Image (cartoon, rainbow, N blue to C red):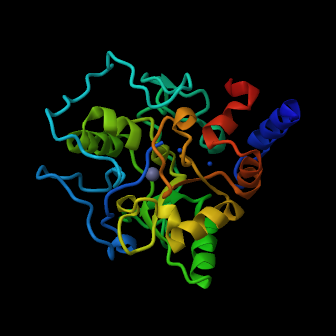
Amino acid sequence: MAVIGLRRCVAAILVTASLTGCAVAAGAAPSPSATASAGPSTPRPSAPAPSTIPEPIPAATPTPTTAPTPLPSAEPTQRPSAGNASYCHVADVVTPSTSYEDPFATYLDWTNRLPAEYAPPDLVNAVTGSRAAGASLLVRALVWPELARLRAAALADGHLLVVVSAYRSYALQAQTFDYWTGVGGYEQALRTSARPGHSEHQLGTAIDFGDGSGAPWDYADWAQTPAGAWLASHAAEFGFVMSYPKGRTAVTCYAYEPWHYRYVGPALAKELVATGLSLREFQSLDPAHD
Ligand SMILES: [Zn+2]
């Protein structure tokens, strides 16, 4: 196919999309937010849970019952094999593009991460769009208008979409990853959560959606539920893409997460969907990011 043309197009979009309209981590246990209060709780270990949203453990993934996996050292010595892509290698390289003005170009994986101090300056309430302090669910201001339209459109079609998890600071992601490491071990946490700095949630443009009836990761495949299926079909129209599609772990590094979407803007989202690529692969088409 016209890879060169696509590269040009992607590069142009990445340059010009400076914010009309875009991370790894994923799901979460039930949110303390009102938007997700209706669902049952994800089973939790006896240890105290983080005060906010931890990453999800897919229901189909068995939790090891043998000897607990030790907590990771700063640099694990063995290379897990979740993905075949070169960037699915556990490392801590600061990702090349960390501009707040162009978050769509920022790619995150097992290797590339955000700096600890990366914190979007324009976070708003993910439910109301308000800048008032105190909200537990936050997204970047550039995300909120389309997020509101997306939820309204879903509701008009009879589907309640709730924000289960949104922005997470580096510190919160560290808590989150430790929590899930405690639940299922380090190897599992790598695939279903993200180490601090490696989560798309730190961008403030990633959202875990639910339908208010339960944690999406408690379903065998949330995309098969009416709300999850609606979202999979319509998300791109509103600029959202599923970061970790089914069967793409080799190129996304992460387990399938039908609830985790990242905002990249409608134009880029539609182009990405047309390619059939995962977001991480799509971002690699930009020559500046090879
Ligand atoms: Zn997520």
Res. 99 in view: yes
Q: Is residue 270 left or right of residue 145?
A: right
Quadrant where the N terminus sits is top right
Q: Residue furthest left?
A: 46
The residue positioned 81% from the left and 33% from the top of the image is: 7
| Residue 127 located left or right of residue 43 | right
Between residues 192 and 73, which one lies in front from this camera angle?
192
Tell which of 282 and 85 is nearer to you. Answer: 85
Up-down: is 70 above or below 12? above
Image position of 104 (left or right of 212): right
Q: Quadrant of the C terminus?
A: top right
Query: Which of the 4 image quadrants contains residue 143?
Result: bottom right
> What residue lies at 57% left-to-right and 73% top-to-bottom?
151
Q: Position of residue 231 (x, y in %)?
A: 58, 66
Residue 71, given in percent of the width and then of the height, sits at 21, 30
Tag count = 0
Closest to the observer, 37 or 45 = 45
- Is residue 193 visible in this depiction of the protein? no
Q: Name the image quarter holding residue 150.
A: bottom right
Q: Position of residue 242 (x, y in %)?
A: 58, 52
Residue 86 x %, y %: 55, 22
As drawn, 80 above or below 193: above
Residue ID at (63%, 42%): 278
> In the image, what residue occupies the spot 67% across and 64% down?
238
